[in-house]
Image (cartoon, grey):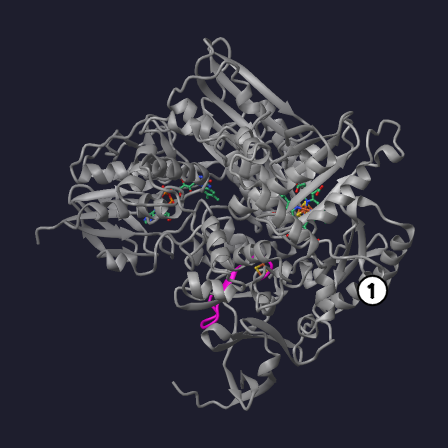
């Protein structure tokens, strides 16, 4: 037998990665792997997901037959007991003895448990393996007060897990004066602590536990300052302790404070023995993160295959989400004067803290910290790692008066060198991603991930990968087609044209003519929306009902528990007392919760499917119509009271808002559209946060476009100034038609404009100067559809075929879903919380 | 394989009551079953009506579709998708849903209930 044998001890994340790397290079080794745990390698980084999920399948790093297929012999539940370096053999607990040529120690680490009296009591746990979690899960059932010892990264994760398990009160104890002392500074910790407390977590810093009390099982925890805290359960997360015992016993060098000493090839003091991952001590450092571990696996595999690759001091930058709060640190987070200048931005109100450490000459970024808002992490990290020169006022990088720097136009990306690390979990560089696009033909982030693994770890780099794919494709002169899904290899814009040219009127016709397969939840709503924009038909006819998104299909928003909400149109927010009474009466009759919405209308929640047509019949009889709160369509045109009452009002903003709302009501678009009209520059209707907004001036109206509220707010930009009402409406016609015609699916006008080459100037050219020569056609189309507008709820209640579908049971029409549950709150009802299993 | 165990067939509805390319919900005692008429493929499927993700009685109001050859249903709440033939969750994470056999005789649709 001439094959050499590699024995790997430890089937954790890094040990598994080592196997992948070796078999990826060659098949000239016999490989044997020993694992202490009963399961094959799984994703420890996402261990906490197991708290909520039922099975471990999602966590495994490979399919169950992977090892067999790779000809690797895997011994699970069989820890290696000893190493004999003279005979070059290992012996396992089950008595297996194997001779090795190369031995790889990937034994990871275990939780460090401080020597506190009482740690052996029942109810005290560590947090490292699936088995630990199983024990924690089953013990947690009757626990009222959970405590975590240790306020570092893992401690906070353990605390989150306790909260997810439904433990009513959870506290974190940290011995240092602040949380996460190794990653973030005092200011950042302070903000983090506040945010965590808002989530219901109690935090006690500067406390050292001294004794665990309780007979048999834990009852309370005592501290050295004499204080006491109640605890029915304790998770110890006070640090990690490398598992170097095998190495120690066979005389391999280990560090003073633990860890198997390795050189830049991952070789230990015995050159045929390697150590990688959390058990390895490189330049006096244990790396408690998976990315450096993966790099070590790669280096060790390369060394064994006689390739020249070495391990260098690894960047410990991280971005995490802890109990819903983003925390990131990069470069050297703590550096300060006289070695660097620091820029700090703190917003106690929103719980945001950002720190940049800039070189004394102001040219380079050296490191920093982000708490509460880490969206700029990727680019800041790249700026540090690649020594990109900073702009004149580097503070702007974290101030966000503008778009997040990462997404603006990818300008930051083109400046990066090819060896810039984009995915740090998998160690994938910009160059590798670009090559995947240019040479391997990947055309989206998904295939890049399959090809290079970029984005398969924490996923934080996916936005950058997407931008890179687009940039690389553009560079190749490739036309970037945003195809819809596996059923249509066409973009939304192409579908729009083809549907129109071929006069296709139903989803099925479109699928037959232009697609393949049977459709899905991506293409169906998209095409339904196009059909509605183009033909202006009642959306539930021609078999299109089942191709609508749930909300459109039942002309109402579906809610928790399966009931629906009802939002009648209240144009401009103006409503008569009589109609208010009708809403009150209807809500009372059908037992609905009522609320004033954030957009000047009234929402009635909690309607049974079977009641919807009855409710609408009554509303329609009183003169109401659908508010399209469920559709990707015009929502409301908010108004301020304007010149009819207001002492500053320049024009009648309410009348204009109503006129506009009535012109565009029911208009289907790639996303919802919102508008507002203010009577003067005091802007009480918030028009500048809308897709199109109008503000009265002395001479007429100013028209603003492409504003957005929502998760990424953006101010609208001035499109035309001092125009009269008629011109204003013509411009809006053109603007909306251009948007509907060209925007990607689910893209609000703000994002559409951000991606538009030439920006607002180009848009103004199209809309105001009619540079495409489409104005007359667009205005005529808009005019036609405004004239033909019909309330779709009226059509629905009058059509027995459609009405029949508003019934929960097909074999018991009119009988309501008995599983719907409500609770009471402030004299009204509310939906019962999700029932989780 | 032929099943030998006796299947009880529940008369669910008439063919014309079913929704073309969509689902309806069938009551069977305290149970709710979603019945799908995948007209495009000329196939019938039945599954539990409850979506395992947030335990919502909603699959009958979901959207039919396919991945490759596999027929699937997308829950209206968060668009988790499930195979109609095996019940397996195709978007990962959730447990599989129960499926039932369906037959059509004389314009009536029947759902097979085991034992
Ligand atoms: C009812 C209401 C909240 C309230 O009680 O006030 C509401 C409720 C919902 N909003 Fe909203 N939004 C409501 C005003 C707003 C506003 C304020 C406004 O319109 O002036 C905004 C920010 C303004 C904006 O859109 O630019 C707003 C930004 C969003 C967003 C984020 C959009 C974005 O571009 O980021 C979503 C998510 C989406 O549409 O994808 C959303 C989605 C939703 C959905 C539809 C979520 C869903 O799919 O279930 C909620 C439906 C609840 C229901 O069951 O009826 N809602 N939502 C408001 C209804 C207004 C109305 O009368 O029609
Ligand atoms: C809850 C949690 C959250 C985390 N979150 C993050 C994160 O967000 N980002 C990040 O980068 N890192 C995170 N980590 C750290 C990351 O999981 C580790 O860095 C990584 O798992 C280290 O891999 P490893 O293979 O060195 O060790 P391990 O994954 O621990 O694997 C070592 C394996 O060796 C086995 N073993 C030990 N001794 C023997 C023996 N004698 N014989 C046979 N087998 C043996 C052990 O049982 C174990 O299965 C987290 C860790 C935990 C516990
Ligand atoms: S902000 Fe979120 S929770 Fe509130 S209504 Fe809008 S979508 Fe629902
Ligand atoms: S309840 Fe079905 S996907 Fe969430």
- Foreground pick, B39 / A722: A722
Is-magenta flag for residue B80?
yes
| A19 horizontally vs A108: left or right | left
Estimate the x, y position of residue A601 in percent, counting from the top left: 78, 48
Taking A277 as reference, is A73 above or below it? below
| A246 horizontally vs A346: left or right | left
The quadrant of the rendering that contains the N terminus of chain A is bottom left
Q: Specify whether residue A513 is in view.
A: yes
Q: Specify whether residue A152 is in view.
A: no
Estimate the x, y position of residue A185 in percent, counting from the top left: 55, 23
Give me the residue at 45% from left, 71% from top. Answer: B86
- Which of the 4 image quadrants contains residue A830? bottom right
Label 1 marks a residue whose chain is A
Q: Secondary structure at mark 1?
A: helix
Estimate the x, y position of residue A645 in percent, counting from the top left: 90, 34
The quadrant of the rendering that contains the C terminus of chain A is bottom right
| A214 horizontally vs A31: left or right | right
Give me the residue at 50% from left, 73% from top. Answer: B38
Q: Residues within 10 Å of mark 1 (few under 14, many from 20)?
A: some
Read off the magenta span.
B76-88
Give me the residue at 52% from left, 34% from top. Answer: A771
Estimate the x, y position of residue A432 in percent, counting from the top left: 30, 37
Residue annotated with mark 1: A618
Taking A375 as reference, is B53 above or below it? below
- Foreground pick, B17 / B36: B17
Give the number of marks: 1
Specify the quarter for ligand 2. Answer: top left
- Foreground pick, B113 / A583: A583
Give me the residue at 58% from left, 72% from top. Answer: B23
- Foreground pick, A446 / A206: A446
């Amino acid at each position: 037998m001439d094959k050499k044998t590699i024995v790997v001890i430890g089937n954790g994340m890094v040990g598994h990665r080592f196997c992948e790397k070796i078999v990826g290079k060659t098949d000239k080794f016999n490989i044997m792997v020993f694992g202490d745990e009963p399961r094959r390698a799984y994703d420890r980084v996402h261990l906490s997901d197991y708290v909520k999920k039922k099975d471990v399948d999602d966590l495994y790093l490979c399919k169950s037959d992977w090892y067999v297929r790779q000809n690797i012999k895997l011994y699970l539940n069989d820890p290696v007991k000893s190493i004999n370096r003279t005979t070059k053999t290992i012996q396992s607990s089950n008595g297996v003895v194997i001779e090795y040529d190369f031995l790889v120690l990937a034994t990871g680490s275990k939780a460090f448990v401080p020597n506190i009296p009482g740690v052996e009591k029942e109810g005290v746990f560590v947090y490292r393996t699936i088995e630990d979690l199983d024990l924690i899960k089953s013990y947690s059932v009757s626990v009222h007060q959970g405590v975590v010892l240790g306020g570092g990264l893992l401690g906070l994760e353990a605390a989150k897990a306790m909260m997810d398990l439904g433990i009513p009160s959870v506290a974190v104890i940290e011995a240092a004066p602040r949380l996460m002392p190794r990653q973030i500074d005092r200011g950042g910790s302070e903000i983090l602590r506040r945010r965590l407390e808002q989530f219901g977590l109690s935090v006690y810093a500067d406390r050292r536990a001294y004794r665990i009390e309780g007979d048999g099982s834990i009852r309370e925890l005592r501290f050295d300052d004499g204080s006491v805290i109640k605890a029915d359960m304790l998770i110890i997360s006070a640090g990690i302790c490398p598992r170097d015992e095998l190495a120690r016993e066979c005389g391999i060098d280990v560090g003073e404070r633990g860890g198997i000493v390795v050189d830049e090839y991952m070789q230990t003091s015995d050159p045929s023995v390697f150590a990688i991952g959390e058990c390895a001590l490189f330049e006096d450092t244990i790396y408690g993160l998976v990315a450096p571990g993966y790099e070590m696996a790669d280096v060790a595999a390369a060394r064994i295959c006689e390739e020249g690759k070495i391990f260098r001091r690894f960047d410990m930058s991280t971005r995490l989400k802890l109990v819903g709060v983003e925390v990131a640190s990069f470069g050297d987070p703590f550096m300060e004067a006289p070695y660097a200048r620091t820029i700090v931005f703190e917003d106690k109100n929103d719980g945001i803290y950002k720190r940049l450490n800039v070189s004394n000459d102001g040219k380079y970024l050296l490191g920093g910290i982000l708490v509460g808002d880490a969206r700029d992490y990727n680019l800041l990290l790249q700026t540090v790692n690649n020594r990109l020169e900073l702009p004149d006022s580097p503070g702007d990088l974290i101030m966000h008066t503008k778009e997040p720097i990462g997404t603006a136009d990818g300008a930051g990306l083109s400046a990066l060198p090819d060896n810039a690390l984009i995915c740090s979990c998998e160690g994938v560089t910009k160059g590798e991603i670009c090559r995947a696009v240019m040479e391997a033909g990947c055309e989206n982030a998904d295939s890049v991930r399959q090809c290079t693994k970029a984005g398969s770890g924490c996923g934080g780099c996916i936005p950058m990968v997407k931008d890179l794919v687009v940039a690389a494709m553009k560079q190749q002169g490739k036309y970037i087609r945003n195809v819809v899904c596996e059923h249509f290899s066409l973009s939304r814009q192409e579908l729009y044209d083809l549907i129109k040219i071929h006069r296709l009127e139903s989803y099925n016709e479109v699928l037959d003519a232009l697609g393949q397969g049977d459709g899905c939840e991506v293409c169906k709503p998209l095409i339904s929306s196009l059909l509605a924009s183009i033909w202006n038909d009642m959306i539930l006819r021609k078999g299109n009902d089942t191709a609508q998104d749930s909300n459109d299909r039942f002309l109402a928003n579906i809610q928790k528990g399966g009931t629906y909400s009802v939002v009648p149109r209240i144009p401009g927010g103006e409503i008569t007392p009589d109609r208010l009474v009708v809403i009150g009466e209807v809500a009372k009759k059908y037992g609905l919760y009522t609320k004033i919405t954030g957009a000047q209308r009234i929402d009635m929640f909690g309607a049974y499917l079977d009641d919807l047509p009855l409710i609408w019949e009554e509303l329609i009889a009183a003169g109401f119509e659908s508010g399209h709160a469920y559709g990707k369509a015009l929502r409301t045109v908010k108004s301020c009271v304007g010149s009819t009452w207001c002492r500053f009002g320049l024009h009648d903003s309410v009348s204009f808002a109503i006129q506009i709302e009535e012109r565009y009501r029911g208009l289907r678009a790639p996303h919802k559209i919102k508008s507002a009209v203010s009577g003067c520059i005091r802007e009480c209707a918030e028009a500048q946060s809308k897709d199109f907004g109008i503000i009265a001036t002395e001479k007429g109206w100013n028209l603003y476009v492409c504003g957005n509220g929502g998760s990424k707010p953006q101010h609208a930009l001035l499109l035309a100034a001092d125009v009269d009402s008629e011109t204003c409406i013509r411009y809006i016609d053109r603007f909306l038609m251009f948007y509907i015609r060209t925007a990607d699916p689910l893209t609000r006008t703000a994002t559409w404009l951000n991606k538009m080459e030439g920006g607002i100037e180009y848009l103004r050219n199209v809309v105001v100067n009619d540079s495409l020569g489409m104005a007359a056609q667009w205005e005529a189309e808009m005019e036609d559809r405004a004239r033909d507008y019909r309330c779709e709820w009226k059509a629905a209640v009058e059509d027995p075929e459609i009405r029949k579908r508003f019934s929960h049971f097909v074999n018991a029409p009119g009988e309501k879903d008995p599983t719907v549950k409500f609770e009471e709150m402030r004299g009204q009802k509310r939906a019962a919380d999700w029932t989780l299993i | 394989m032929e099943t030998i165990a006796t299947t009880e067939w529940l008369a669910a509805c008439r063919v014309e009551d079913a929704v073309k390319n969509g689902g309806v919900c069938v009551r069977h005692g305290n149970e709710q079953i979603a019945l799908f008429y995948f007209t495009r493929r000329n196939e019938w499927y039945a599954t539990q009506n409850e979506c395992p993700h947030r335990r919502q009685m909603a699959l009958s109001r979901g959207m039919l579709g396919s991945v490759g050859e596999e027929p699937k249903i997308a829950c209206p709440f968060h668009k988790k998708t499930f195979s109609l033939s095996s019940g397996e969750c195709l978007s990962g994470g959730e447990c599989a849903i129960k499926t039932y056999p369906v037959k059509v005789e004389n314009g009536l649709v029947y759902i097979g209930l085991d034992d």
